[in-house]
Amino acid sequence: MNARTALRIAVAFLSVTLAVVAVTTLDSCGTGRDHRIRLTIWHQDRIDIRVILQRQLDRFMQLHREVRVEQLFKETEELRSGFIIAALAGQGPEIVYGPADQVGPFEIMKIILPLEEVFPKDWLAQFDPRGLTWYKGHLYQVADKLGNHLTLVYNKKLVPVPPRTDEELIRIGKTLTADLNGDGKTDRYGLTWNYTEPFFFIPFMTGFGGWIMDDAGNPTLNSRGTVDGLKFIKRLRDEEKIIPNEADYNVADILFKDGNAGMIVNGDWSWAGYQKAGLDIGVAPLPLITSTGLWCAPMVSPKGFSLNANISEEKKAWALELIRFLMSAENQMESARELYTMPTHMQVQQSDFVQQNDILRNSRIQIDRGRSLPVVPELRAIWDAMRPSYQAVLAGTMTPERAAEEMQLLALRRIKEMNE
Amino acid sequence: MQSQTLRHRIYLFILVAPAFVVLFGVVIYPFFYNIVLSLSNMNLRHIRDWRIIGFGQYIKVFTEPSQPDFYVVFLKTVIWTVVNLFFHVVLGVFLALVLNQKEIRGKAIFRAILVLPWAVPQLIVALTWRGMFNYEYGSINLMLTQWFNIPGVQWLRHPLEAFIAVIITNVWLGFPFMMVIALGALQSIPHDLYEASDIDGASWYHKLRHITLPLIRPVMVPAITLGTIWTFNNLNIVWLVSNAGEPSDQTHLLVSFVYKAAFNFYRYGYGAALSMVIFFILLVFSLTFMRKSKATQNVYS
Amino acid sequence: MVRRKNTTTLRITASYVVLMVFSLVALYPVWQIFNISLRPSDRLLSTSLELIPANASFGNYSALFTERPFLLWMLNSTFIALTVTLTGVALASTCGYAFSRYSFIGKKIGLLSLLVTQMFPATMLLLPMYIMLVQLHLINSYLGIVIMYSATALPFCIWQMKGYYDTIPTSLEEAGKIDGCNEFQTFVRIIFPLAAPALVITALFSFMSAWTEYVVAAQILQDTELWTLPLGLKSFESNMGSEWGLYGAASVIVTIPVVVLFLSLSRWLVSGLTLGSVKE
């Protein structure tokens, strides 16, 4: 190889390298000039909430010109794992916003800060205690929204008056379930929902008197409540036939949106979507189980702010200021009005709008009847343990009694594995 | 060709080094990090204060009673890989041969359509397939019942049918890749060889077996090897179509365990050990396959 | 002669049938995605077999560009994908050539180690990768992304190129030498053009890896202005309540450049080699 060839090779690689460098310098020229303090919030909010959040952040930045706040959306699972990875590496956003069950794992990994010392007690007293997440004696999350709860959503055109008890639910369901075009297939169902997912089974477990764990965090899946709840779901599908054969979240959603289901069990995140789809919906609390006299109680979770343990002192003061701003009465009111989210600020809760708006009124009733989402990390083990047996019952390959036992055993084993 | 002069050594170095520097820089550190993790007890309780405990995690991988059973899932993963690759390669090569015939018109249109499964974003197409497998509303059952009068299959409710459903989806997703490789490979075969054998009166089968297949082998073998490795670890499709393992956590690959261990249960030590085990399985496979197909050699020599 | 012609006609007809059938099979699910983009109110599924949904509208497509920074994502992705394609073709073509033509110490190990980099399940690599990226200040950097993508795409491309070079007889290089070309010229003028089909595959594969990759991009690009298309698409997703209309429209648009690239590169998927090119 002579000098000329060597030169040619060098030129070839140089041009490639230059291209790479050119591309990379193009992006970094913007951020150097900004000398404002930078705060980042990571969250898992859907688009309508993001829009409102940006509006509120813009107002905050107007008030405080020396700060720049950015929001980054990550899908729920990724938010949790992404925050863990980033925080363990000493990085991550200053504030992380999400449902309360994040607190457990974050606390054990020591990546979020206790908040009871940094917020004055009289400030904290303004909020619904259910919005303040305490764990192992410390406050780890302050929430501006309460809910994430399942409710009974009904299409007013098909269901003028929502059912109050399970028997009424079945009765209404049966009148609606019909084969409209005579082809032998049911075209419309009375009720539909993502019933194959354990989270969506919980209200029926509680309605029959069961719950997933005791106060110490030990699973209590092997109970009468679980068994009867399972039997009830099977009854709805196999005997009363008011729910479809197979329905995951998307299928149930479509059925309801197309008007092919009169009622759906879905959470507060879905109401706005149904309204946008042109449905005249009503929100009602889940029914009373006549045989037990108990109301179906879904899980209720606050969604709130936690502080990254890696936060610098300088940024900490601003982060607290930002949290106080976002939690203020005006901002909570804005969310409540536009998104039907239940505020935690007591003043806003008492306001006319929240008290009188149809959807929020019913949402409130349901929240009051609900049970708090546990924040312990073992919760994941419980979901994982419930799923296989639950689906086996639905598939007809396991009896409800056996399923309850299996769930309990598997939950215990998973918890043991997690804690070794 | 061999030459041991210094000039050639430098030349070689310039050709090969940059790629390898980048590759190893990116891969080595995570790899060794994982080896260390696999020998540690890092989990929820020991997230910062983890320490080396020896081979305990490996023992757990092989002996811990798991639901579903480790060996069943291992077998499933092997079946998944073999079946997928078989159809990918057979369909891919077949379509490439058909498409490559000089009498075919409209090659561009067919190519564009047939490459779509590879080009489309995986998440939405996987969920679309999942929707197609729905018992009551899915297109597949609708077609079966309305056009062929066959009763609908409970695809996603039973383990075997669910397994078949994910395989079908992945075969659909994967054949364009092999088809493109095969199309490229076919171009390397000189026309004269076919003409010569036509003169000799060879049948199409003879030409296929003695000219086409052997000569596309050098190009197909890397694709098959890497395709096997990728398919073995392809969590995405199985997870999405089966909605994370339904029914009842039966539709899983070995790599699903890694995902669940790391992301659901925070058992990072266990996850790392299992990843190492998967790695060794694939390493053994690749070495044997490479040796058998003599892939590091040249075909005309 | 007549019998020969009939067999040919039969073969061609059968070929067209096969191609049509497979085209339908390939197209159907993709058509469903197109339908998703046309349906109002984020409907992922439909309960009927209709080909065009009721109330179809292109609203999602315009919303994509007016309500979201889709164009920005496209520009970012194009930059990155083209760079990765360039580096991929440059590095793989030269590296593959070395592995094909020369034998040197560590050749076998080198080739096998390329494979080895692919065998590790990606899940466990996330934490160390993030730590590494932070230490090297490659977070929010396109250089970081290009390096990572090249690293993931190169092993296959190098193997590919080597395999293809292996099918080109070395007699051609000898002929070139006799004609007075040095090694580099032989490579550039004779071998490189003949390897065009493999270069097509390398280019396409590198492009696709960069165009559709999500996990690494999510780790590296935390600044929304740097987002690539996969990250943008992911933002339409929500645990429950994804914006399927937008997602469908975005998916359709994202697919088009790939198909266009493939078609434009396809004209090099031709055979350049005949045995007679070396005068014996």
Image (cartoon, coloured by chain):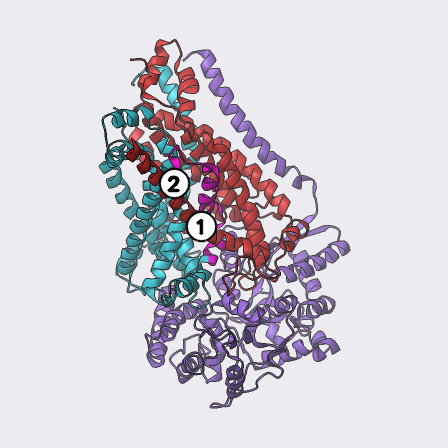
Chain colours: A purple, B cyan, C red
Q: Which residue is mark 1?
A: C24
- Residue contact at pointers 2 and 1, CB within 8 angstroms: no
**Relative depth, front residue between B105 and C167:** B105
Q: Is residue B34 magenta?
A: no
Q: Identity of the amino acid at label 2? A: Met
Report x, y in % for residue B17. Answer: 41, 28
Report x, y in % for residue A5. Answer: 45, 15
Q: Residue at x 31, y 56 (%)?
A: B57
Q: Provide the secondary structure element on which disc 1 rests.
A: helix
User: Could you tell whether A31 is left or right of B1 in the image?
Assistant: right
Residue C96, relative to residue C260: is it above or below? Answer: above
Residue B259, relative to residue B297: is it above or below? Answer: below
Q: Residues within 10 Å of mark 1 (few under 14, many from 20)?
A: some
**Relative depth, front residue between A179 and A121:** A179
Q: CA distance from mark 2 to mark 1?
A: 16 Å
Q: Which residues are magenta?
A: B99-128
Residue furthest right in the image: A63
Q: Residues within 10 Å of mark 2 (few under 14, many from 20)?
A: many
Q: Residue at x 61, y 52 (%)?
A: A312
Question: What number is the disc on residue B179?
Answer: 2
Q: Residue at x 47, y 54 (%)?
A: C29
Q: Provide the secondary structure element on which disc 2 rests.
A: helix
